[in-house]
Image: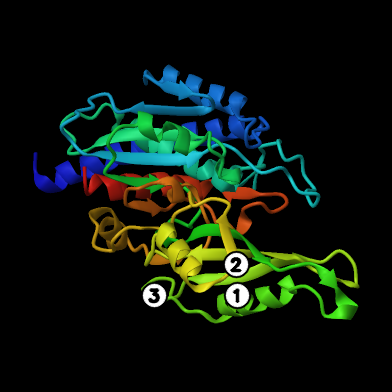
Amino acid sequence: MHNSIKTLFLRLHFMIDTNTLYKQAVDLLQQLIAIPSFSREENLTADVIEQFLDQKGVKTHRKLNNIWAWNKYFDASKPTILLNSHHDTVKPNSGYTRDPYDAKIEDGKLFGLGSNDAGGCLVSLISVFLYFYDHEHLKYNFCLATTAEEEISGVNGLELIIPDLGKLDFGIVGEPTQMQLAIAERGLMVLDCTAHGKAGHAAREEGENAIYKALPDIEWFRNFRFPVESEVFGPVKMSVTIINAGSQHNVVPASCTFTVDVRVTDAYRNEEVLEIIRQHVACDVTPRSIRLKPSKIDKSHPIVQAGIALGRSTYGSPTTSDQSLLDIPSLKVGPGDSARSHTADEFVYVDEIREGIALYIEMLGEIV
């Protein structure tokens, strides 16, 4: 076949395939929106996703409310790409003027709770997985993981099933980014700090005032700059956000507790930042968790370069996602707009889903 005719044929085939996938994706998203799926209560949406994939002939696996699958011709000798997004939602806020579970399409907008965060991404990645599912002779395997508890950074979501997914080489995490390329994401540590003093009567110069002992440490958190700065985010950011001490006006407080919000960049691991903090302050420092790690993928990575070639731009994401639970390079990208997430009368444009499916396929097609 002449090259130009062959190219036209392949392009037409691609358009037909993606149009079918788009229609299925919108229908699936409407079904998911109609079902409440708050974090830890996603069993019914997990059922719908499981049944949808089963009907497509995909062998699925399930643990609690997480569903995953591999491509038909999985080959353990090949590298594997993770396609991940979540199907849990926050609760609707009081500003809603519409039924949050009525998935109507009006003026090109698909309304409903979770439509934008991250339903459009989820159904688009499911569509991409189906597009490549029964292709033979791919250079990569695909692992689709539709997961729970992302909105609460819960332990029974993606983190629960990572050991079951096997070796993964890099991932695409579906979150609304307007299909721009989030190549880095801040990590998060919340620190509970305690300065210790000694109680005494305020009128008699007794005791050691824990508030005064806390002040130098609070000032250190305010002013310290970590020596290594991220090319994407700049410095690690630390903010003292809560402070508590004392019980009555005439008693010198024996303890002063304060909370520090630490946004860790891709220049450090959480453990490194925690160690540096403990070396510099006198108070006790207890992290609530070090699970939510910073993440990054090199701008030279083939998947990033494929996106750039399609006119996508790169940036560092200020919001936290399931990327924070991965120890592999990962790219956060998806249809929708982060500014719409968790807002009243949430929506996603259906054309964003159509474009998302096409761009995902074109980006991955350059690699696989």
Instruction: Answer with left or right where residue 154 lies relative to residue 171.
Output: right
| Residue 41 image position (x, y, % from top left) | 65, 30
Q: Is residue 246 visible?
A: yes
Task: Kindly identify the amino acid type of the residue bearing the numbered disc 3.
Answer: Glu
Residue closest to the eye, 15 or 343 = 343
Q: Residue at x 66, y 31 (%)?
A: 34
Q: CA distance from mark 2 to mark 3?
A: 25 Å
Residue closest to the eye, 363 or 73 = 73
The mark lying in front, picked from 1 and 3, is 1
**Residue under circle 1?**
217
Task: Kindly identify the amino acid type of the residue bearing the numbered disc 1.
Answer: Asp
Task: Kindly identify the amino acid type of the residue bearing the numbered disc 2.
Answer: Cys
Q: Quadrant of residue 104?
A: top right
Q: Which quarter shows the N terminus?
A: top left
Image marks 1 and 3: residues in contact by CB distance under 8 Å: no
| Residue 244 image position (x, y, % from top left) | 76, 65
Image marks 2 and 1: residues in contact by CB distance under 8 Å: yes
Q: Is residue 181 visible?
A: no
Q: Which quarter shows the C terminus?
A: top left
Count of marks, rendered view = 3
**Residue under circle 2?**
283
Q: Residue at x 42, y 58 (%)?
A: 271
Dot 2: element: loop
| Residue 68 image position (x, y, % from top left) | 41, 28
